[in-house]
């Protein structure tokens, strides 16, 4: 004979396993974290591009001023060039991300 408590325990165990499997396959939180991570990654990429442009401009300007003895002139000039190059690179990265998103949205709209 089968024990009624044993049968209910088996049913509860199957129910628990089903709920655990459902919780493990939940993708909403994982997708949200990936989206936030990609936004943070993009922000850091843009900051690094700007700082790299400024750093390279500073290095070239300082080096030329040291070699030529014209201390503030090339330093200020190349820091400005470095800033402009950093901003241009940041804008190019933003456009690249925007184009990728538009292509993804167009592909999703095409599927629907």
Image (cartoon, rainbow, N blue to C red):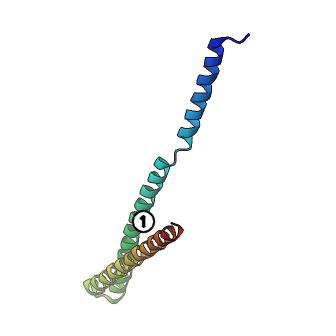
User: Front-most of 69 and 105?
Assistant: 105
Badge 1 density bin: few <14, some 14–19, many ≥20, Cα 10 Å: some
Which residue corresponds to the image point at 37% horizontal and 67% vertical from the top-left?
47
Left/right of residue 36 with respect to residue 72 in the rendered view: right
**Residue at label 1?**
42
Residue extending furthest toward the left: 72
Residue extending furthest toward the right: 1
Which residue corresponds to the image point at 65% horizontal and 15% vertical from the top-left?
6
Tell me where residue 97 appears, x and y as whole percent.
44, 71
Which residue corresponds to the image point at 65% horizontal and 17% vertical from the top-left?
7
User: Front-most of 23 and 86?
Assistant: 23
Q: Dot 1: what SS?
A: helix
Left/right of residue 105 with respect to residue 6 in the rendered view: left
Number of callouts in the render?
1
Q: Relative to 73, does residue 112 appear above or below in the rendering?
A: above
In the picture, the quarter occupied by the N terminus is top right
Q: Relative to 15, does residue 25 appear above or below in the rendering?
A: below
Tell me where residue 8 appears, x and y as whole percent.
61, 18
Tell me where residue 63 appears, x and y as whole percent.
37, 82
User: Front-most of 55 and 7?
Assistant: 7
Dividing the picture into quadrants, the one containing residue 39 is: bottom left
User: Front-most of 107 and 99?
Assistant: 107
Tell me where residue 65 appears, x and y as whole percent.
32, 85
């Amino acid at each position: 004979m089968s024990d009624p408590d044993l049968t209910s325990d088996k049913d509860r165990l199957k129910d628990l396993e089903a709920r655990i499997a459902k919780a493990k396959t939940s993708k909403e939180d994982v997708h949200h974290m990936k989206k936030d991570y990609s936004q943070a990654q993009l922000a850091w990429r843009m900051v690094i591009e700007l700082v790299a442009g400024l750093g390279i401009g500073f290095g070239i300007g300082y080096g030329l001023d040291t070699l030529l003895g014209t201390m503030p002139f090339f330093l200020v000039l190349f820091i400005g060039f470095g800033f402009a190059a950093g901003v241009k690179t940041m804008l190019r990265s933003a456009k690249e991300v925007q184009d990728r998103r538009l292509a993804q949205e167009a592909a999703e709209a095409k599927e629907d």
